[in-house]
Amino acid sequence: MNDGFDLPLVKIEADALAEGWEKAVIAAWEQGVEIPTQYDKPDDPPSRDISLALTVRDPFAEPRIHRALPGGIYDLEVYRQEVVDGIHDHWIDPEAGKWQYTYHERLTSYKVPDGQALNQLDYVVEALSQAPHTRRAQAVVWKAWEDAGIDDPACLQRMWFRVFGDRLVLAVHMRSNDAFKAAYMNMYVFTELQREIAERVSERLGREIAVGQYNHCVDSFHIYGSYFKDMKGFLGTLEKRSFEERTWTMAQVEPLIEEAREKIAASLQREEETPSPPPGR
């Protein structure tokens, strides 16, 4: 472990998403400093923590899927639809003990104290359509007047978009990111949103804007002490399996994604017919 800094800032470059996530997790394990968290149980060892600056040159290069993702392909598709399509925005009702926000709601219906609801992604598309090189195309998530002191404050803070050479760059900034059990799903879904914005800007400009570089910037990229046993098992797979055996291409998982979409659609239909309280966030 690296104890030469209070909190090491680690820069990582990768060609593809699965590769970048794997490198980042290994860096957090090997270079992370020990620090407790507010979620530790009495017997948990301190977490390992770094600040991360990860750059992925082509987030849609294959193999895109890492087999060590938490949950499975169904959970990944649910999360994609939650962030990109807002399928669970109707679960937001903090006064009833339900969700306090979703990323989709904050990005597309950001409510300010005067009652306005701002669609920040529409603004991003408009700004990039007017001047693709603009430095002003960003969307924020944090609400200082609401989020200070709530039980589950947003980890994602802002998204910054810019077109370089007909390629859309996305820089995501997070205050906190669970490296082992959440970060891959975050990266996957945020790049799906990057692709959607690139498609919308392409339509507006009348020329193709491809998905470009993805930057994942995190103040606290950490591995919880309660995950150390699982983490050591993950490290064991690095010795036993090739990178190709640790990953999937999108073509390999497409049947599972289609199956997940059918199940999600059926679940949403049942929920519409017989509403029930959602799980706590």
Image: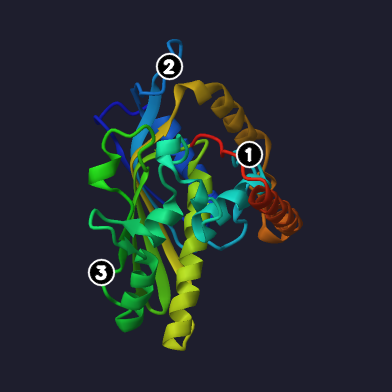
**Which residue was labeled with disc 1?**
71
**Which residue was labeled with disc 3?**
136
Residue 4 position in % (x across, y down):
26, 29
Residue 247 position in % (x across, y down):
65, 48
Which residue occupies the foreground of this view, 150 or 11?
150
Q: Is residue 103 left or right of residue 229?
A: left
**Mark 1: amino acid:** Gly
Q: Looking at the image, is mark 3 or mark 2 earlier in the sequence?
A: 2
Q: Quadrant of residue 37?
A: top left
**Which residue was labeled with disc 2?**
45
- Furthest toward the bottom, the residue is 206
Residue 99 position in % (x across, y down):
46, 41
Find the distance from the CA under tag 1 to the CA under tag 3.
36 Å
Find the distance from the CA under tag 3 to the CA under tag 2.
42 Å
| Residue appearing at x 61%, y 50% in the figure | 78
Q: Nearer the viewer, mark 3 or mark 2?
A: 3
C-beta proximity under 8 Å, tags 3 and 2: no
| Residue appearing at x 42%, y 35% in the figure | 28
